Image (cartoon, rainbow, N blue to C red):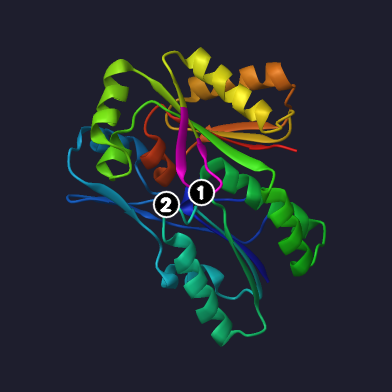
Amino acid sequence: MVKFVADSSCDLFELPGVEHFTAVPLIISTEERTYQDDMNLDLHEMLDYLASYRGRSYTACPSPDGWLQAFDGADEIYVVTITSGLSGTCASANVAKEMYLSEHPEAKILVIDSLSTGPEMRMILEKLAELKNLGKSFEEVEKEIADYMANTHLYFVLKSLHNLSQNGRVNKIVASAVGILHINILGIASPEGTIAPINKCRSEKKVIEAMMDEMAAAGYKGAKLRIAHVENEEFATRAAEAIRNRFGTADILVYPSTGLCSFYAERGGILIGCECK
């Protein structure tokens, strides 16, 4: 049996064209509440609560046991995790891999550190499914997915840095200024898999233009693109239309983010994954 497994920051609970897919939930916590990032999460309520919360907030990766439950019964497993630059999720998955192989030495397991999250993870999973549906061997998939990931990128536009500041990843004074001045922060997932702000703009139009300039500089020419939004479908749709008008992109999906990416991107934010060939 072939299984595809990811942590819940992939923003998917089903993977099209795949029979066996599991999204292992991450945990979002404050000193008062804990949210599990699964299909039962009330995202709107979580966002409301976190927007007004002034204490520390943080996330926790799945335990090795969570991964092992997702692996159960498979002899070929493809795992995609959120960047190791933000989370211990990849390390946990690798611990589970070694535990599973000790009991099932004939199994083959590929654990992929996406060095990203959200839409870029989704594209990696879609490519894995495509390669297996073409009948590729485990070894062929391992090589081709590495080549594919060399040409994928993640961009994001954030309207708030509140959670990142409460999480200790952004200076609180900077985060406060962003909110007060209504600044849009444009950023990328760096090659090391960290959050890297690269520009700031007052208007949505200007930040979309700046993002498209960055995409073009990275080699984007209209290939596959995925946009996840945090309760801001209107902004995401405008970004999609602008990208389609400039690059002629046909394969675009716009969809809501789930819990983990919504925690980091916050209400109003969007994340864009694309193929740059």
275, 214: nearer the viewer: 214
User: What secondary structure is marked by label 2?
Assistant: loop
124, 37: nearer the viewer: 124
- Residue at 43% of width from left, 71% of height from top? 64
Q: Position of residue 23 (x, y in %)?
A: 51, 56
Residue highlighted by disc 2:
86
For residue 8, above or below residue 110? above
Q: Residue furthest right?
A: 135
Q: Position of residue 161 (x, y in %)?
A: 33, 33
Q: Give whichever of discs 1 and 2 has the lower sequence position.
A: 2
For residue 56, above or below residue 248? below
Q: Which residues are magenta?
A: 188-198
- Kindly report the distance in space between the C-alpha atoms of the residues bearing marks 1 and 2: 7 Å
Which label number is shown at residue 193? 1
Q: Position of residue 83 (x, y in %)?
A: 49, 53
- Residue at 43% of width from left, 32% of height from top? 230
Locate residue 158 relative to residue 139 in the image: left or right: left
Q: Kindly check if marks 1 and 2 are in contact, taking CB atoms under 8 A apart as contact.
A: yes
Q: Position of residue 156 (x, y in %)?
A: 50, 32
Question: Does the rendering let one see residue 200?
Answer: yes
Which label number is shown at residue 251? none
Residue 228 belongs to the span the image colors magenta = no
For residue 30, above or below residue 156? below
Q: Amino acid at mark 1?
A: Gly
176, 269: nearer the viewer: 176
Q: Amino acid at mark 2?
A: Leu
